[in-house]
Image (spheres, rainbow, N blue to C red):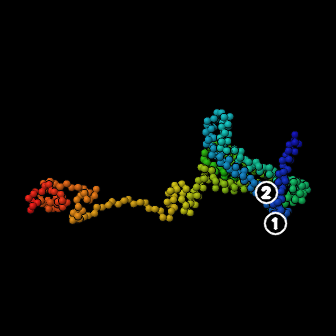
């Protein structure tokens, strides 16, 4: 049974040995021509190059990890409602929760994929370094015996990159290994804290998911710190570089595409508003009609209220020339002549005179006066 497990592990790890050694030796060909093939700097830079290639290949999985983590955060209020509704029935709660994840396209295990897929590469590099240190005269995958001997004996700051904190009593090796263990632990902690403090909404800070995140925040650094003292210096360079890559990549994603309702989203809104103010751009929340008027170089002035026309002042002679009231137009007022008016009234230019000028008989006039 044990032999079968060992044989299965060999079948799985052999392709990874070839892949890891191919990338590692490709970078060593580059840096070896600058620093020398036996130099510790060329081998450390080759390990860093291997890390960059592996992490670049995992970018699509990292994007899925970010989306899954964001969906998990945004779904926490609905998960809490399901917990209140089906808290007494664990099977029903689990079924409804998985249905919610399936409906929204959320994979709870996607956040672990980058780490899980890195572990085989990490293990392959660990075995290559360990084999070169213990059996420098034997080849493995593309690592020939000559290259394995140079790899095992390469030094950086007076410490072999194949040594670990626990495998030697040399002060220089332990100092360098201790610094790298602290750096690996600190970057692991800061990466997780960066995600929790800036890209998690307030509703997601409580509940089961938040408790899991808090547990990982403190447990993972402790695990790496305890296991890191047994890692070769070359492996410590690999893992620290991988953590720095994750931190920078996560910082970029959180800054430019934060989850809604998070401190990072609020900070992005403030930056965008300040940028629009500097460039004189309108606020996207402003209606399009208002923006079109405000953006035009000569915005139209509001219409003035119509002015009330004042009646034109006329003299008595001008009024007499206008004729009878019917000739003034439909808006003119008609004045009825008073019957029995005296001749003086007609002589004064009143209605009697206007009726006489028009050739109409004056009912109130006396016959004798007309002859006179």
Q: Mark 2 points at which residue?
A: 50
The residue shown at (33%, 59%) is 308
Q: Which of 140 and 215 is in front in this view?
A: 140
Q: Which residue lies furthest to the bottom in this view?
A: 34
Q: Where is residue 264 in the image (x, y as percent from the top left)?
A: 62, 53
Q: Where is residue 30 in the image (x, y as percent from the top left)?
A: 81, 63
Q: Nearer the viewer, residue 312 or 73?
A: 312
Label 1 or label 2, whichever comes before in sequence order: 1
The residue shown at (41%, 60%) is 303
The residue shown at (66%, 34%) is 92
Q: How crowded is mark 2: few (under 14 residues within 10 Å), some or many (20 or more)?
A: many
The residue shown at (66%, 33%) is 89
Q: Is mark 1 on a helix, strand or loop?
A: helix
Quarter occupied by the C terminus = bottom left
Q: Nearer the viewer, residue 28 or 170?
A: 28
Q: Position of residue 180 (x, y in %)?
A: 76, 56
Q: Quadrant of residue 271?
A: bottom right
Q: Mark 1 points at which residue?
A: 34
Quarter occupied by the N terminus = top right
Left or right: where 103 falls relative to 356 = right
Rendered image: mark on residue 150: none
């Amino acid at each position: 049974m044990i032999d079968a497990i060992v044989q299965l592990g060999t079948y799985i790890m052999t392709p990874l040995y070839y892949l890891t050694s191919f990338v590692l030796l490709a970078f060593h060909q580059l840096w070896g021509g600058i620093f020398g093939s036996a130099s510790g700097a060329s081998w450390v830079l080759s390990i860093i190059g291997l890390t960059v290639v592996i992490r670049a290949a995992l970018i699509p999985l990292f994007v899925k990890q970010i989306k899954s983590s964001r969906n998990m955060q945004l779904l926490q209020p609905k998960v809490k409602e399901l917990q209140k509704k089906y808290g007494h029935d664990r099977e029903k709660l689990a079924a409804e929760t998985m249905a919610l994840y399936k409906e929204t396209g959320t994979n709870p295990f996607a956040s672990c994929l980058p780490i899980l897929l890195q572990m085989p590469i990490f293990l392959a590099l660990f075995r290559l370094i360990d084999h070169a240190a213990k059996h420098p005269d034997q080849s493995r995958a593309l690592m020939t015996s000559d290259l394995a001997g140079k790899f095992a004996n390469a030094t950086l700051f007076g410490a072999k990159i194949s040594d670990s904190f626990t495998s030697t009593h040399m002060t220089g090796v332990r100092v360098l290994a201790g610094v790298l263990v602290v750096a690996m632990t600190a970057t692991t902690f800061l990466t997780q804290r960066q995600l929790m403090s800036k890209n998690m909404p307030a509703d997601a800070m409580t509940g089961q998911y938040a408790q899991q995140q808090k547990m990982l925040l403190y447990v993972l650094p402790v695990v790496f710190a305890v296991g890191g003292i047994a890692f070769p210096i070359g492996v410590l360079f690999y893992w620290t570089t991988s953590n720095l890559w994750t931190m920078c990549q996560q910082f970029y994603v959180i800054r430019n595409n934060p989850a809604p309702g998070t401190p990072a989203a609020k900070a992005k809104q403030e930056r965008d508003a300040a940028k629009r103010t500097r460039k004189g751009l309108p606020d996207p929340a402003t209606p399009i009609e208002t923006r079109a008027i405000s953006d035009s170089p000569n915005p139209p002035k509001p219409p003035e209220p119509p002015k009330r026309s004042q009646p034109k002042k006329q003299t008595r002679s001008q009024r007499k020339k206008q004729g009878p009231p019917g000739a003034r137009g439909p808006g003119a007022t008609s004045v009825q002549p008073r019957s029995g008016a005296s001749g003086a009234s007609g002589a004064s230019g009143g209605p009697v005179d206007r009726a006489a000028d028009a050739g109409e008989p004056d009912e109130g006039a006396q016959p004798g006066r007309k002859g006179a």
